[in-house]
Every structure is written in C-alpha cells, then in structure tokens.
C-alpha cells in the first residue's frame, strides 16, 4: 500500500510502537474518506482495550499490527466497493429483466447466494 510505517521505541512504556512514515498518503486517504487526519493516524497506530466495565486503555500497535490494520481497512473498503458496484449494476438491469451479475466458480465447489470481493479474488487467482 501507499501507507508505510516504521517501528519506534516508546520511552514511557519501554515497548515498541509504530509511526506513519507516508503522511501524504494518509492526508489524501483521510480527505477522500472524509475522516480527520489525526484520527486516521490514531486508528492505524493504536488500539483501544476495554478493561473492566468502563475503563478503556489506548495501546500502541507494533509495526506488524499497524500494517495489519492498514491491510484490513483496505480489504474492507474494497469489499464494500465491490458490493456497491455489483448492487448498482444489478439495479440497472431492473427488477423484471431477470438479468444479474454473478461470479462463476468453474470448479463448482461453492454456491453462494451472494459473492464477495474476497471470493472474486480467490476465484481469479485460482483461474
């Protein structure tokens, strides 16, 4: 991805954390998603842990955890975009046409009522 991180030492806890290196990519992404720039950095580099019923502890993500958070966000966004696109295309056919977009798995192992972006990528890779 365009968002890169580096590992940093956290002097207050003596543990490792992460820091966004590619700030321009975060600025563009946060603007396009209409998310506060600082909030986006915080979401990618920290996580909240609930301790008890009401206490929430903010803990830094290590480098690999920040990369996983970035990748998970990208996967979720591509999945939502795929679902939206298929829905719009199917709506354009009209409810009475009987036509629709579907994903064909030539091996026939799966039969889903609704296919996901992830399934499309798996099928594409397998073909």
Image (cartoon, grey):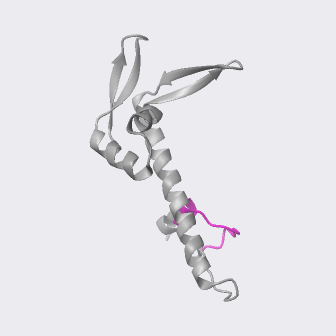
Task: Return the x and y of residue 22 as percentages of the image width and height.
Answer: 28, 40
The secondary structure that most of the magenta stretch takes on is: loop
Q: Quadrant of residue 3?
A: top left
Task: Return the x and y of residue 73 as percentages of the image width and height.
Answer: 49, 46
Task: State whether residue 100 is above or below residue 23.
Answer: below
Task: State whether residue 72 is above or below residue 39.
Answer: below
The residue depicted at 44 percent of the width and 35 percent of the height is: 39
Can see residue 101? no
Task: Return the x and y of residue 30 as percentages of the image width and height.
Answer: 39, 45
Task: Return the x and y of residue 125 as percentages of the image width and height.
Answer: 47, 65
> Is residue 62 shown left or right of residue 118?
left
Between 91 and 64, the residue placed more toward the observer is 91
Total numbered labels:
0
Q: Residue furthest bottom?
A: 97
Between 5 and 89, the residue placed more toward the observer is 89
Task: State whether residue 17 is above or below residue 4.
Answer: above
The residue depicted at 56 percent of the width and 66 percent of the height is: 84
Is-magenta flag for residue 112?
A: yes
The residue depicted at 42 percent of the width and 40 percent of the height is: 36
> Is residue 118 shown left or right of residue 31?
right
Q: Quadrant of residue 56?
A: top right
Between 52 and 37, the residue placed more toward the observer is 37
The segment highlighted magenta reads: 107-120
Is-magenta flag for residue 116?
A: yes
Can see residue 9? yes
The residue depicted at 34 percent of the width and 29 percent of the height is: 19
């Amino acid at each position: 991805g365009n968002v890169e991180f580096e590992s940093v030492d956290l002097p207050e806890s003596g543990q490792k954390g992460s820091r966004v290196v590619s700030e321009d990519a975060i600025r563009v992404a946060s603007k396009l998603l209409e998310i506060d720039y600082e909030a986006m950095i915080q979401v990618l580099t920290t996580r909240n842990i609930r301790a008890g019923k009401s206490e929430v502890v903010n803990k830094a993500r290590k480098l690999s955890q920040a990369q996983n958070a970035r990748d998970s966000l990208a996967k979720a966004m591509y999945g939502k975009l795929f679902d939206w696109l298929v829905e719009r295309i199917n709506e354009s056919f009209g409810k009475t046409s009987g036509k629709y977009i579907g994903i064909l798995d030539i091996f026939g192992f799966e039969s889903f009522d609704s296919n996901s972006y992830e399934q499309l990528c798996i099928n594409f890779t397998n073909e």
